[in-house]
Amino acid sequence: MERRTVLKIVGLGLGGALVAGGGGLGVYYAAARRDTVGKVDFATPLRIPPLAEPTTGTPGAVRFALDVQAGRTQLKAGAPTRTWGVNGTYLAPTIRARRGQAVELAVHNGLEEATSLHWHGMHLPAAMDGGPHQPVAAGGTWTPRWTVDQRAATLWYHPHVHGSTADHTYRGLTGMFIVDDPVGEGAEALNLPATYGVDDVPMIVQDRAFDGDNQFVERLPLAGSLGVIGDEILVNGTLGPFFDVTTRLVRLRLLNASNARLYHFGFSDARRFALVGTDGGLLAEPWETDRLHLSPGERAEIVVEFAPGETVDLRSYPSPDLGGTSGRLDGFADRLDICRFRAAGDLADETVLPATLGEAPDLDGVAATAERSFVLASDQINGRSMAMDRIDFGVRVGTVEVWEVINDNGYVHNFHVHDVQFQVLTVDGAVPPPHLRGWKDTVLLVPGSRYRLAMRFSDHTDPNVPYMYHCHLLQHEDDGMMGQFVVLDEGQDIGAVPGGHDHT
Ligand code: C2O
Ligand code: CU
Ligand code: CU
């Protein structure tokens, strides 16, 4: 144990000095605080994921071809890293579609094993969701179609094969899916920064551990509770990125695409920034802050103001109060450099931050048809592990439900629901903090916490094909901290999952 621990420390690049300093978990614990501030050479321009080029599909639909492939990517100096990507060798193109638009995605799997692509945050029929029941076989093509029917929002996509979501995602199958809303709430009506890659910047934030040969280290740490935690940060696949700012206001679409790491975002000069959107769309009004937590799967749209000629770094700061019993090993004490922003001497100044943005969620006070309780502990929800052929419950179409979610564990979890965006009604019985007052599909659950979430199931009934709810710490999900529900019509009963349990 001791020897493997030491090897692990060396493998993480935490320094040979520790080996000389002695062994044992005490040293591992002391070493577990990572601090990369001032050590990252911000020498590479931030890569901007290309926009997926639409083609014409089924009449009336816009079609995107997504080719999942394995390859090698030059992520750092020296040997290239074995990675997976979509239409490239690492990460995936940004898909953009408008509310009301019919979309069709041709997902071709060029890997040697089955995988899937799930549209995280999307409201759509369960059979199109890309979850564990829609695997795409090696060499196969899967073509889901649906009509985009939700607010402007920053969504994303990633694999969701049961038992392998963590590994498949870690290798690089991750992209953004931006929903635009030409008429209602949305940037176009509001004059928010909206030029992709210029003043509206996607930021897919991932931590990775590399071995001495520049390959991703996928194996789980000996200690720690969340899964693999890396010590190097990639943004859009760029290590040590800088971004050249050309406008006074810049919108950043932050996505925590890490398997396990929590980020506590802030800037090196402690400047304030405005949170304008959460998982499901714009907030009712901007909220000013200097720090923001994002757990795996969560997104935030923030607007940052820059002055001509300045340089400032985006970092992740420690959040020691959140980590529970193994917080330090799980990265909660870490301080990490993420991206440098370099403002030009002259900044264009055409956008303004509106005082009001979207509509506040309105489910508080709506009579709930059902209340359910979900207790997360020991890689299970309500004492049960995910089973492919077990539908845990059915919800009735047209109703609002309140789900109480409880972390009854010493470890950090979060909670994600497919198909819907929910409103956080209360956190430990109190009114939620400002960053949880917009539409959400994933929430952080620190140990001992209790959230009440309200959600409406408006359509897309299917008694046989379930949606998932789960912890989005991917190792926990793979280990079984997940369940399944169906949306039922009036008078309908829960059916049976097609194909039974043969996908596992
Ligand atoms: Cu981001 Cu069930 O997934
Ligand atoms: Cu999802
Ligand atoms: Cu968890």
Image (spheres, rainbow, N blue to C red):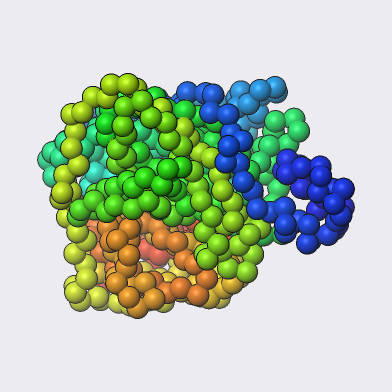
Q: Is residue 260 above or below residue 111?
A: below
Q: Nearer the viewer, residue 80 or 427?
A: 427
State how many labels appear.
Answer: 0
Q: Look at the image and tell me whether residue 69 can be seen.
A: no
Q: Nearer the viewer, residue 253 or 459?
A: 253
Q: Look at the image and tell me whether residue 365 can be seen.
A: yes
| Residue at (81, 44) in percent of width and height | 17
- x, y percentage for residue 420? 31, 57
Residue 117 left/right relative to 190:
right
Q: Quadrant of residue 75?
A: top right
Q: Nearer the viewer, residue 302 or 348?
A: 348
Q: Quadrant of residue 492?
A: bottom left
Q: Quadrant of the C terminus?
A: bottom right
- x, y percentage for residue 85? 53, 31
Q: Is residue 450 above or below residue 243?
A: below
Q: Quadrant of residue 434?
A: bottom left
| Residue at (52, 23) in percent of width and height | 44
- x, y percentage for residue 109? 52, 33
- x, y percentage for residue 395? 32, 69
Q: Is residue 307 above or below residue 164?
A: above
Q: Is residue 198 above or below residue 178?
A: above
Residue 279 left/right relative to 412:
left
Residue 12 left/right relative to 197:
right
| Residue at (15, 40) in percent of width and height | 190
Q: Quadrant of the N terminus?
A: bottom right
Q: Nearer the viewer, residue 319 or 177?
A: 319
